[in-house]
Image: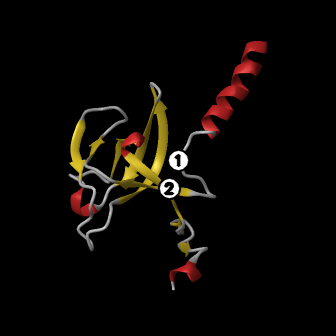
Amino acid sequence: MILALLVLPALASAHSARPYAPSEAKSFDAVLSDWTAIMKSPGGDPVFEMQPQSFYQDKQQRLLVLQATEIDGKTWLKVRLPSWFSHGMSSGWLNAKRVQIAVNPWRVEVSRAAGTMNAPNWRSWR
């Protein structure tokens, strides 16, 4: 019983301290600076490589981070993939060491149940 009381707080703090995991307060982009392998699962076999430049105005690829996890000391990021180059995948995993991390200032909240959309920072879009 005492062991459980000591372990549970440690697990909770390790879980909440994951870097780059999106929250209600902040989200992140993975910014590609080189060709980067995309996997179906963290640490899995590469499905394809994503180019560092987008086709839109030749800018750096910025992929929204959906989830972050650590496996064997490596941080893996689940990212939203662009529909034009996704190989049938809407999201994929990449090694966090292969990208730069940037805070994503945009936020849109959608409730399908209520049929509403809220953009708290909509004034910034103008």
Q: Is residue 14 visible?
A: yes
Q: Which residue is mark 2?
A: 28
Compare residues 71 and 58 and report the one nearer the observer.
Answer: 58
Residue 48's quadrant in the figure? top left
Residue visible at 67% across and 33% down in the picture: 12
Q: Residue furthest bottom?
A: 126
Residue 116 position within the rendered picture, expressed as x and y whole percent measured from the top left: 55, 74
Q: Is residue 104 left or right of residue 26?
A: left
Compare residues 120 and 95 and report the one nearer the observer.
Answer: 95
Q: Residue furthest right?
A: 2
Q: Is residue 64 left or right of residue 50?
A: right
Residue visible at 54% across and 46% down in the picture: 21
**Amino acid type shown at disc 1:** Tyr
Q: Which residue is mark 1?
A: 20
**Amino acid type shown at disc 2:** Phe
Q: Is residue 1 visible?
A: no
Q: Is residue 43 left or right of residue 11?
A: left
6 versus 19 height, above or below: above
Q: Answer with mark 1 or mark 2, whichever residue precedes in sequence.
A: 1
Is the residue marked by circle 2 packed among few (<14), some (14-19), or many (20+) residues within 10 Å? Answer: many
Residue 18's quadrant in the figure? top right
Q: Which mark is residue 54?
A: none
Q: Residue furthest front?
A: 33
Count the marks: how many?
2
Mark 1 element type:
loop
Residue 19 position within the rendered picture, expressed as x and y whole percent measured from the top left: 55, 43
54 versus 11 height, above or below: below
Mark 2 element type:
strand
Residue visible at 63% across and 40% down in the picture: 16
